[in-house]
Image (spheres, rainbow, N blue to C red):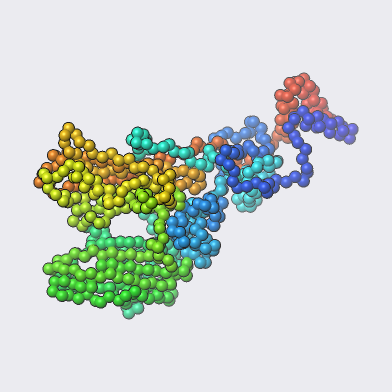
Amino acid sequence: MAAAQPMLSLLLLLLVAASGKAKPRDENSTLEAEETSTNETSPSEAPTSEEASTNETSPSEAPTSEAAEVQRKERLDPRAGASSSICPCDLHPGFCDLNCCCDSSCGSDCSTGGPECPFSFCLPGSTRAVSQVCVEKSTIFQNNTPYRTDVLPGPGGCVLLFCVELNDPKLNYLQQPQVVTKVNFPALSAQYGGSSFNLPDQVLSSPPAFYRVGDPIQTYFAASSVLSILKQPVGIGTSQLCIDENPAGFLESKNTSCIRILTDLTSSCTTDPALDAASYYRGFSVLKVPVNMTIFQPIQVNIIPVSQPASPSLSGSTCHNVVSEVSYEVEFNGIHGIQKVSVQFKVASISGNPRATLQQHFSLHFGRRSPSLTKQRSGNPGYIIGAPLIVLYNGTQQHITILQNQVDGQCSATKRHKVQFRENVRTSCQFSVPFKLEEANCSHFQETLYQAFEGTYNLGGLAITGNADPSRPGERTNIFTQGCKMQEGDCMVPISLKIQVIWAHVGLLSNPQAQILGARYHYLCKSLKSIGNVVNMLPLTTAVAFTDATKWPEPPRSQPRAYWKLPFDFFFPFKVALSGAVSSSGSLPGTLLVTLTFCKLLVS
């Protein structure tokens, strides 16, 4: 057996030379990733999972594409966005936006669970997400990929995983959507359109130990030792009557309005607390942090009025010093709670004999700096759901608005509803015709209705992204308008407007950005003769529908399993080497001779 050792070594060298694939390797070679590799590569470079060579398995044991699993790990860095220049939730420059972990104005310590930050979670897109494909480290023979790699502990810490960061643009990027024109707009709307109205999901959350976003703000009435919550009245239903039991949410800045109907102004003027400014700050205080009901030790913060208006007073059939607007300003300091609360009022005089109607406005704002001092974006860069749609015109930025009804059902001349991104809406109201229809000029009547539908601002160009610059024409797209035309000599006037907006996600799948592709104003027209000459109220309807035209990438190919095992066949490497020798030399008899010789040596 000792004499056979040199021959066995010689045979192994011949087999290695015949394979043409093996390379000399140091015994102390490691699997550490190259330190010069970078995070980013050009989109034209598309690494695949084959670039990290692994030990082969026998063809009979190779997993099928259906059985292959992809283990993707999302590593989160609370202070880094997907790109240093992209922070999609930074909507107020110089102001800390809520739950926006990439906002530089929130400070370096503002991370989830930080002592100086009330954020309970990070908004999507404000954290760094890296997609990886991982396999068991023991299966890696040599790391030859130029892309970023890492060695991470597996579940339970018993094994190590060798991970390669994916950088295939076909997998990581959304496809570039096609250009929307006036010609292909109906086809795209029919292809990608669907249901327009869906009910939102209602999620109820239990109050935590300290104030979190959306929690009710607790108040305390010291005279009666009653614990309550701060309330912000809101209108409900088509009548918009005031409901006083609406709780104010922590860190949720809101503006609400509602209508109060006073059946007897003479008695309500001095007795109704909703009309008296003192009832909105006197006799109770706001709790700095929520209290534990078992250990009741409230830390109270008094509400400070900016000015103290006089109490309501009655003079004949007119009630003076009635509250028409209430504005709360709340300062907070992370999980340490509310630090200061101030309130400001606007009063008015109302008359009635005895019945009267009063419209009240309520606002609640949080922060050390009012967001109204900065120009608010609708996204950065892509639109975010619920943000107002922006129109750029003559270097200015305006919001698209539609008709809104009043309490009596008529179209409001001053208040309009803002169109919000991806929120389909339908409104209807009665338009008061300012002149007699039999004396109306067709073009003048059409222009009056167009202005009622579109508002006082010129439509201009629709902003493609939420942070579009009004001074850059390339950051806006045209709005196609389909108006009313004369038909057989009859005057056609618009009675309904349908606003269609086509949008799509672009960019990385891990941090997609929504942008507007095109929009159309489609008017439904009616003959002036069919309306009649005695009508002075014309019903107008507006509907807004958003259509998603996102082009998603092709599904990825099968990826290696994370826990591939080494082959159990001891002769497998020699089979591979011999198969390579056969394909390269084509000498089957010589290969068989070498194999038989090797087997004889092992048996002896």
Counting from the top left corner in percent of width and height, residue 337 is at: 44, 69
Residue sitting at 17 percent across and 38 percent down? 491
Q: Nearer the viewer, residue 212 or 322?
A: 322
Q: On the picture, is 491 further left or further right than 483?
A: left
Q: Residue 572's spot in the image, x, y percent? A: 71, 32
- Quadrant location of the C terminus? top right
Q: Is residue 206 visible?
A: no
Relative vertical location of residue 163 with respect to residue 574 in this rendering, above or below: below
Q: Is residue 240 above or below residue 443?
A: below
Front-most of residues 266 and 18:
266
Closest to the observer, 358 or 414: 414
Q: What residue is drawn where x is 77% and y is 46%?
A: 28
Determine if residue 62 is in view. yes
Q: Is residue 571 left or right of residue 366?
A: right
Count of numbered tags: 0
Residue at horizontal 49 percent and vertical 64 percent from the top: 117
Where does residue 133 sit, x and y in percent of width and height? 59, 43
Instruction: Find residue 373 and report its image quarter.
Output: bottom left
Quadrant position of residue 213:
bottom left
Which residue occupies the extreme bottom position in the image?
A: 223
Front-lying residue, 237 or 170: 170
Q: Is residue 43 above or below residue 374?
A: above
* Left or right side of 359 for 1: right
User: Which residue is at 81% across, 32% downward?
Assistant: 13
Residue 242: x %, y % from top left = 25, 63
- Name the residue furthest left: 534
Q: Looking at the rendering, in which quadrant would you find the N terminus?
A: top right
Residue 569's place in the image compared with 260, above or below, is above
